Image (spheres, coloured by chain):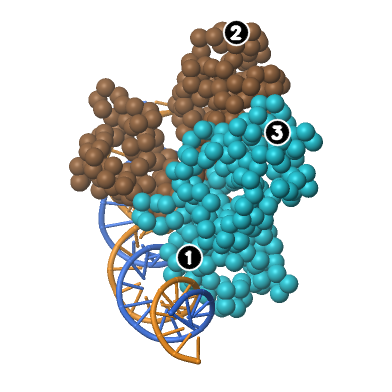
Chain colours: A cyan, B brown, C blue, D orange
DNA sequence: ACTAAAGGATGACAAATATCATATCTTAAA
DNA sequence: TTTAAGATATGATATTTGTCATCCTTTAGT
């Protein structure tokens, strides 16, 4: 069983507010496991008995719409927590979580989180700020979905993916998403997304090489994104 | 200066978690004021030095998109609080608030809210649950905007307005929104919204009499909304 | 009561987006 | 390696939605 003290999740999440004693408790009660690409961490409607710490990898949070299509609501990556809203609300998960890459995850039982929550004001405030940040982001995405064209949303999404997940050595986006997944982020048909990527490619905004995407003209993309 | 003890906001918001002493403090520090229909309570980007309690009336929370159109992100009504996210995040308001009706509002300074927040665990947990609820709602709306047609979104919005704000004696929706505002909720052009309302009217789903809207066939609307 | 301004309605048309069909390419399993 | 399944690409077409113009109706102000 590894220690939580040096874990990357401590750097980026509410766990940074925990003191040494609390970290020891955390190490004791957590369970580690790995998740293969494509595997489900939890499904929409599941009751979560705790939160997940993402030590490595990226997953998507999705919701199935009644038209049968999945919408990606958020991508969650290394260093972040998963399941906070559900835990605080004491409600089943509103979104499902699926690994986009192989992941290393820890599970911390609800009882332990609530103990920190009640005992450590900094921890609860920090967690709250995360939820608030998510709310702000969700509102902003909501406005984009309502007011921007698919083309604009694609430009925004590509810039977001580069900013958030960075680049490989060849300047291509580090995060690997299928065309269908990109469509599911921007809320459009897969074919429309593919067509626009081709168009961006032809007009020199991006460069497509197989699955790889390189943002060639970020200024142009930013202008498109407005 | 009126007492907070009997205030309707206590019934529905995090204020229900305050004890008698705290309520007295609240009464002491709050300022009451009224807002006329159409007036701005705060604007996107404003730094809020506290939260607002809505004693009466309804307001819209909007965000201006780069295309020049306002998107209504949420309607907030009698009994609810305003500005919680901004307060917790210690960030400027992400959304602007404009009265849809004449309102009675109280303002509670940040210092006092934070005092309750730190001293009273129930209060902070309750407030957090509100933010979590907002997040869930925002995610759900986001999915609808991404995946549902304008017609479906209109049906959903009409049902929501009836459920949330109720009916007048003549069965018409109690909340009065302009066509432009309805468009701004469902994220479409005003003309498209007007056209669909006419269509719903002709097909017997709703009945339009001037500004009044009566949901005639809720079953049909629910089916449309899926 | 009159008038201007705003809101609402509708047609004609354009643009954006979805859908369906099909072809090609990639990947993983036998 | 071969093959099948899935992913990507693209054309043709249908549908949805937006835009612009115009007219009608209501509302607020003088």
- Of labels 2 and 3, the one closer to you: 3
The secondary structure type at the circle numbered 1 is helix
Q: Distance between the residues labelled 2 and 3?
A: 28 Å
Q: Position of residue B19 (x, y in %)?
A: 60, 11
The secondary structure type at the circle numbered 2 is helix
- Nearest the camera: A197 or B106? A197
Q: Mark 1 points at which residue?
A: A180
Q: Where is residue A195 in the image (x, y as percent from the top left)?
A: 48, 72
Q: Name the residue under label 2.
A: B20
Assign the C terminus of chain A to one quadrant of the image.
Answer: bottom right
Q: Identify the mark nearer the N-term, 1 or 3.
A: 3
Q: Which residue is drawn at 53% across and 51% down?
A: A41
Q: Which chain is disc 2 placed on? A: B
Q: Are marks 1 and 3 on the same chain?
A: yes
Q: Distance between the residues labelled 2 and 1?
A: 55 Å
Numbered label attached to residue B96: none
Q: Which chain is disc 3 placed on? A: A
Q: Residue at x 77, y 33 (%)?
A: A21
Q: Residue at x 56, y 33 (%)?
A: A88
Compared with A225, B205 (above or below) is: above
Q: Name the residue under label 3.
A: A123
Q: Which chain is disc 1 placed on? A: A
């Amino acid at each position: 069983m590894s220690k939580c003290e040096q874990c990357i999740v401590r750097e980026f999440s509410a766990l940074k507010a925990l003191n040494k004693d609390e970290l020891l408790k955390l190490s004791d009660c957590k369970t580690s496991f790995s998740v293969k690409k494509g595997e489900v961490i939890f499904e929409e409607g599941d009751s979560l008995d705790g939160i997940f710490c993402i030590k490595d990898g990226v997953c998507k949070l999705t919701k199935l719409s009644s038209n049968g299509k999945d919408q990606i609501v958020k991508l969650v990556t290394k260093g972040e927590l998963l399941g906070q809203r559900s835990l605080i609300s004491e409600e089943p998960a509103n979104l499902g979580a699926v690994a986009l890459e192989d992941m290393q995850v820890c599970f911390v039982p609800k009882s332990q989180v609530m103990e920190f929550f009640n005992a450590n004001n900094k921890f609860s405030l920090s967690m709250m700020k995360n939820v608030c940040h998510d709310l702000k982001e969700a509102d902003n995405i909501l406005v984009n979905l309502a007011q921007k064209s698919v083309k604009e949303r694609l430009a925004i999404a590509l810039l977001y993916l580069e900013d958030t997940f960075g680049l490989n050595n060849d300047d291509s986006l580090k995060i690997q998403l299928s065309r269908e997944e990109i469509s599911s982020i921007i809320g459009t048909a897969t074919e429309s997304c593919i067509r626009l990527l081709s168009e961006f490619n032809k007009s020199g905004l991006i460069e497509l090489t197989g699955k790889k995407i390189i943002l060639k003209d970020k200024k142009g993309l930013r202008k498109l994104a407005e």
